Image (cartoon, helix red, strand yellow):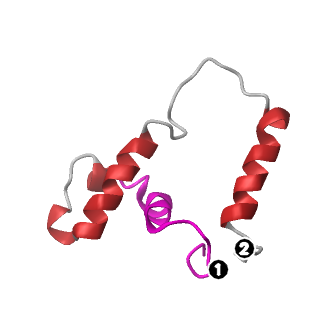
Amino acid sequence: VAKEKQTTLPSAGLFIIRYHSFYTLHKSEAYEHLVNDEDRENMKWLKVFNIYDLYSKSKVRINVEEVEPYYISLINKYFPTKLKW
């Protein structure tokens, strides 16, 4: 969906969206024989992202109303047109 709608996300961002839950790819490297050089480079960014993904635990409560404008601005920047599901 994101790629088709001409997002301005870099290829590493699209890779992260697609593969962040595919742990056998980037944790145990079970599919190493199927990846190319671009995938290997993108996996470096994916491993950085995983430090901050939704499974990251923090006791700090985030004020959603306070941070919402920031995240809306990111959505508007990287997804300038409305996504169609």
Relative image position of residue 68 (x, y in whole percent): 80, 43
Judge from the rendering whether residue 36 lies leftward or rightward of residue 61; answer left or right: left
Vertical side of 78 occupied by 84: above or below: below
Residue shown at the point (62%, 79%) measured from the top left:
6
Q: Would you identify the image quadrant in which residue 58 lies?
A: top right
Q: Taking the image as drawn, is residue 35 in sight? A: no
Q: Can you identify the residue that label 1 sits on?
A: 5
Residue shown at the point (41%, 59%) measured from the top left:
19
Vertical side of 74 occupied by 80: above or below: below
Give, as a three-letter code, the residue at label 1.
Answer: Lys
Q: Taking the image as drawn, is residue 60 in sight? A: yes
Q: Can you identify the residue that label 2 sits on?
A: 83
Q: Residue furthest top?
A: 59
Judge from the rendering whether residue 82 lies leftward or rightward of residue 7; answer left or right: right
Q: Nearer the viewer, residue 71 or 54?
A: 71
Q: Residue furthest left?
A: 33
Figure quadrant of the C terminus:
bottom right
Q: In the image, which residues are magenta?
A: 1-22
Q: Nearer the viewer, residue 42 or 34?
A: 42
Label annotation for residue 35: none
Give, as a three-letter code, the residue at label 2.
Answer: Leu
Residue shown at the point (28%, 56%) measured from the top left:
25
Q: Under tag 2, what secondary structure?
A: loop
